[in-house]
Amino acid sequence: DGYDEGAGPFTLPGLLAAAVSDGYDECAQPPNLALPLMDFQRQTLAWMRDKERSERGLNGVFWEERRWADGGKYWYFPLAGELRLSEPPLVRGGMLSEEMGLGKTLEVLALVSADADAARAAAEAKTAAAKEEPPEAEEEGEEDR
């Protein structure tokens, strides 16, 4: 169920118990970041990147799309017992909530660095692919003349 047996599903203790994490996959150290990240910081970095890229966004974690008997849609938030008739807005990202002194600033800098590296690599790949493609449109245009 995702909540503590001693806490009901629609109580604050129940919501907090459902949010407890047993850890997360680690991602690689961003190459442009001079300070080495600790294991838990690499887990946090992986989590932040996943939250930014999530197809359904932050609300997709909490809200389930369901159907009425007539086929109409509604959305249900099981942890809070809420129902809504319109789709929750798409919200990407998350809330970085770690104790003071654990390196939240470094984690955010790592996220910026990792995203910049990924964007640079994607742009370079796109440029390389464009250079490899023969300019077919120009060749066909010359033949038609």
Image (cartoon, helix red, strand yellow):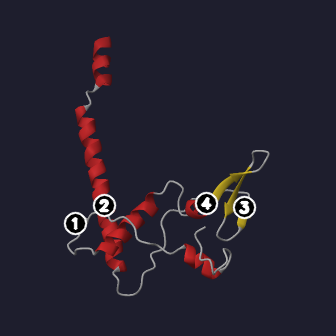
Crowding around mark 1 (Cα neighbors within 10 Å: few <14, some 14 to 19, many 20+) is few
| Marks 1/2: CA–CA distance | 9 Å
Q: Which residue is mark 4?
A: 89
Element under label 1?
loop
Amino acid type of the residue that numbered disc 2 sits on in the rendered structure = Ala
Decide if residue 81 is on the left or right side of residue 92: right
Q: In the image, which is nearer the foreground, mark 1 or mark 3?
A: 3
Q: Are marks 1 and 2 in contact (CB under 8 Å)?
A: yes
Mark carried by residue 73: none
**Residue that badge 1 annotates:** 32
* Residue 65 position within the rendered picture, expressed as x and y whole percent measured from the top left: 65, 54
x, y percentage for residue 119?
32, 55
Pick the front one: 122 or 7 = 7
Q: Which residue type does callout 3 highlight? A: Arg
Residue that protrudes farthest toward the front in the picture? 5
Mark 2 vs mark 3: in front: 3
CA separation in Å, label 1 and label 3? 44 Å
Residue for point 50% across, 62% down: 92
Q: Earlier in the sequence, mark 1 or mark 4?
A: 1
> Residue at 33% across / 74% down in the picture?
41
125 above or below 49? above
Amino acid found under the numbered disc labelled 1: Asn
Q: Quadrant of the C terminus?
A: top left
Which element is circle 3 on?
Answer: strand
Examine the rendered structure and indicate whether residue 70 appears above or below residue 96: above
Q: Which residue is mark 3?
A: 84
| Residue 25 figure quarter | bottom left
Local SS, label 4: loop
Quarter of the image for residue 7 reads bottom right
User: Dot 3: few (<14), some (14–19), or many (≥20) neighbours within 10 Å?
Assistant: few
Question: To which residue does mark 2 refer?
Answer: 116
Tell me the element at label 2.
Answer: helix
